Image (spheres, helix red, strand yellow):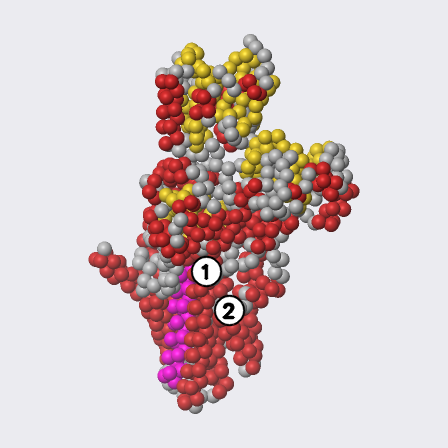
Amino acid sequence: MWYTQTREAVLEEQKVNAATGLSSEEVKARLKRYGPNQLKGKPKPSIWALFFAQLKDMLIYVLLGAVVVTLIVGEYVDAIIILAVVILNAAIGVIQERKAEKAIEALQQMTANKSLVRRDGEVREIDSIDIVPGDIVILDAGRYIPADLRLLESANLQIEESALTGESVPSDKQAEDLYEDPKTPIGDLSNMAFMSTLVTYGRGEGIVVATAMDTEMGKIAKILDEDIQELTPLQKKLEELGKMLGYIAIGICVVIFVIGLLQGRDLFELFLTAISLAVAAIPEGLPAIVAIVLALGVTRMSRINAIVKKLPAVETLGSVNIICSDKTGTLTQNKMTVVKHFTAEPLEDEVPVEMIKAFVLCSDATYENGEGTGDPTEIALVVYGEQHNILKRSLEAEYKRVGEKPFDSDRKLMSTVNQTREGYRVHTKGAIDQLLQISSSAVVNGEVVPLTEELKQRYLQAAEAMSDDALRVLGAAYKDTDRILPPEDMEQDLTVLGFVGMIDPPRIEVKDSIREAKMAGITPIMITGDHRNTAVAIAKELDIAHSLEQSMTGAEIDTLSDKDFAEKIRNIRVFARVSPEHKVKIVKAFKAQGNIVSMTGDGVNDAPSLKNADIGVAMGITGTDVSKGASDMILTDDNFTTIVQAIREGRNIYANIRKTVTFLLACNFGEIVAILASILFFWPLPLLATQILWINLVTDTLPAIALGVDPGEKDVMKRKPRNPKESFFAGGAALQAVLGGLLIGALTLVAFYVGLAEHGYGLRSPNISEEAMTYARTMAFVVLAASQLFYSFSKRSATKSIFAVGLFSNKLLVGAVIAGLVLQYASISIPFLAAAFKVQNLSLPDWGLVFVLALIPLILNEIIKVFVRMRRGASA
C-alpha cells in the first residue's frame, strides 16, 4: 500500500531519483515490462466472429434451408442468388459494427491527454499513454492525473475526484500525510492522486505507482467490462417477426406438400413451388435494409454531435420518455459566471473597479485567448475583470505580488500582498461573513467609513438575497500597508469593498430543447451532486421544475424503501446531492414503472447507471473512457440539446423502419397470395422462385431503403413517445398491409390471366405452350414489380396523401422507383437476363395495360386515406 509508506521509501522501492526522474533507457525497459498506460477493453472479435454472429437469425436459417433444397433439386442459379443475399446481409452488419468501433477509437484519440514529467533531469511534455511506473509527474491546475501517483510535494494542492468518487467538491492533498489502515477509503487518501482526476488548484509532484489496468480506474474498468446487454425493442420485434415469418414459410411449405400430394402433383414441382413460397414469404432484404437504415441514421446523428456505438440503440431513442440529465456542463455551461455585484454605494450602474482589481489580483487562475486554467471560481473572477477591461496580465505587471496567504477551507479566505506606487496593499477574497468578522471599515460612496453593525446587516441581507437565488457569494476587502506583512498579520482590520454573486448559468439553447421534449411527452429529470437550492434555481429557469417540493436529496432517498421511493419519484423532477449509487436507484425506479429511460454521465462511477439505463449517454468532452465504454451513445459536445435532437432522429428512424417493414410485408404477402391461389385452384404458377428473388432483392430493396431515409413528418415531436411494446402493425398498419398485399397479388394473377388469354389459353387449360407461359409470367412479373414500386409512394404516411407529404420531398424514393422500373425493363429486354429469369419483352399495348394495373394499389390506398382522415377528424 503506497499510501502507508513514506515518500523516501516509495522512491527507493521504485528505484528513482526525484530530482532527475527516470532515464530514457529505463523508460524503454519499463514500457516493455508494463505496457502502454491505457485502459483496455475486451479483445475485439475477429471479422469471422462478427460475420457468423450476423447469421444467427430465423430468417437467415430459413434462407439457408432454401439453399440446401435448391442444391438438392439442381436449381444452382437459385441457390447462388439466395446465398448471395445471405452473404450481403452479413457483410453489411460487419461493416457497420467496424465503423462504429472506429468512431469510438477516433473519439478516444481526440480526448488523449498530455502530461508533464521529469526525465533525464529535465521537464518535458509527453502523451499520457507513454507514462510508466516510477515517472515523476509535475502537477498544476487544469491538468488531468495520468496514472495513480504517490504525492512527493504539494502546495495548496486540490484535486477534483468526482470521476472516481462521485464527490464534486475538490479534495485537499498533503504529500506528507501517512495512513496506517489498509482499508482507508479512496476519497480520504490525501497523499495519493488517481488516474483521470483533475487538479483544480495549487501545485505538486508525484511518483507513478500504477498505470493502465493496475490503477484504481483500471480496477473499476475490469468490473464494468462485462456485457449487460438487453435486446432493444426493435431487435425484439425483428426477432419475433423473423420467427413468425419462418414458421409461416415452413407452415406454407407443409400445406403445399399436403395439397400437392392430394392433387397428385409432381414431387419435383412441389419442391420448386415450396421454394417459391418460402422465398415469397420472407423479405430476404429486410435484415440488410434495416441495417442500412440504421447505419444512415447513425451517420446523420454523428453530424449533430451524437456518436451511436450500437445500431439498434438509435431506434430505442424513439421510445424514450424520461431523460435523466446531469446538470453541470449538460444543462449548464460548466463555467462559473459573475452575474451580480453589491457595494455599499447607491450607484448601481457604476463599475466597482477597486473591487474587481482586488478579485483579479487575489487569484491564481489565468485566462487567455478564451481559455482558462485554475479554479473555476477564480477563472470567473478573472473573466469578470476582462469584461470591464481590467486585464490580469497588465494588472500583475503593475502590481507585483510579493506575498500571499493561500486559501484554506477552515478560514474560507485567501490573501495576497501586492506592491503599489505608495507601498503595499493586501487583497483578501472569501466568504462575506468571514470578511465582515476581520474588517473594521468599508468603502461607501468612494470613502472609507467605519463598519457599523447596521452596515454589516446591509451586507448580510444583500448576500442572503443572492444566496436565495442560488448564487455563490464571494466578497473582497483590502488593507494598505508600508511593509510586506507576514501571513498571520494580513487578515486583520480590513476594509470591505463589496461582493459578487456567481453561478454556472444554463446553456442558452437548452430551454427550447426542454420545451420541445415536454411537447413530445418526454419528462426531463435533473440529477446533480450540487446543492438543492442551486439545482432547483437552475431547474426553475429551464422549466424542468417549478417548486422546491419537486426536488429530493440523496439523503432523503436513503430514508425511503424501494417501494416508497418508486411511488414518490413520480412527482420529483430534481435530485440533488446524489451519489452514483443513487443514480442507479433512480434509473431502476423509473424503469420499474415501465418508462424507457435515458441517462447521462461522465465519471467512472456513473458507468453502472449508464449500463442500467435503456440508453446510456456519455459525455465526449468531460467523460472518462470507462463511462464512454459503458454507454450506448456519446455526445461530442456534452449538450442536452443534442439528446433531444437524437430522440427526434430516433423517432423518425423507427417510423421509417416501420414503413419499410410494412411495405416489404405487403409486397411479400402479394407474392404469397398469387402463388397460394394458383396452387389451391390448380392454376399454373404465375412466378418462378428466381423471379420472386429478383423482385425482393432489387425492385423491393431500392424503394425500401429510400423509405428508410424518408425526411419524416414534421410533427413527429408533437406526439407522445411510442410504447415499446407496441406492435409494428399498430394503428391499422396490419390491415393496410393485408389490403395492399391482396390487391398486389390479385392484380398479378389478372396480368398472368391476360397474358395466357392473349395466346388462347385459360388458367385451367391443359398443355399450355412454353411461349404462352413465358409471356404470361412476364406480364405477372412486370405488374408485381411495378405495383410494388408505385405502392411505395403511399407508404410515406399512414394518413396524409402523397401530395400533402410532397411527391418530390423524398427525391431518393422518386429515383428508386425510376431505377426499379429501368431495372425491371432491363431484366426482360436484355437477352442474357431474360434467359436467366425465363421472361421476354412485351408488346406496346401490354406495357400500357401493366402500368394501369400497377397503379391501382397506389390509387386505392390514397382513397382509403381520405376516409381515415375523415374518421379521425370526426373523432377529434
Amino acid type at image mark 1: Thr
Q: Is residue 753 left or right of residue 107?
A: left
Question: Which residue is drawn at the image coordinates 74% and 46% (left, top)?
Answer: 30
Instruction: Kindly identify the amino acid type of the residue bearing the numbered disc 2.
Output: Asp
Residue at x-position 61% and y-position 34%: 174
The answer to whether one can see residue 685 in this image is yes
In x, y percent, where is residue 377? 50, 30
Where residue 866 sits, quadrant-wise, is bottom left
**Number of residues whose C-alpha sits closer than 10 Å to that of mark 2, classed few (under 14), some (14–19) or many (20 or more):** some
Q: Residue furthest front?
A: 180
Query: Is tag 2's residue or tag 1's residue first in the polypeptide sequence?
Result: 2
Furthest-left residue in this view: 874
**In this rendering, position of residue 826 left or right of residue 677:** right
**Residue 815 sits inside the magenta stretch:** no
Q: Is residue 676 magenta?
A: yes
Q: Main secondary structure of the magenta part?
A: helix
Residue 692 in the image, given as x and y percentages of width and height: 46, 72
Of residue 253 and residue 56, the one placed in the foreground of this image is: 56
Q: Is residue 240 above or below residue 9?
A: below
Furthest-top residue in this view: 422
Other residues around mark 1 within 10 Å, as few (<14) / some (14–19) / many (≥20)? some
Q: Which residues are magenta?
A: 657-684
Q: Is residue 287 above or below residue 538?
A: below
Q: Position of residue 194 (x, y in %)?
A: 60, 42
Above or below, comparing residue 692 to residue 98 in the picture: below
Helix, strand or loop for disc 2? loop
* Residue assigned mark 1: 232
**Residue beneath the point at 42% across and 51% down:** 586
Q: Which residue is mark 2?
A: 57
| SS at circle 1 | loop
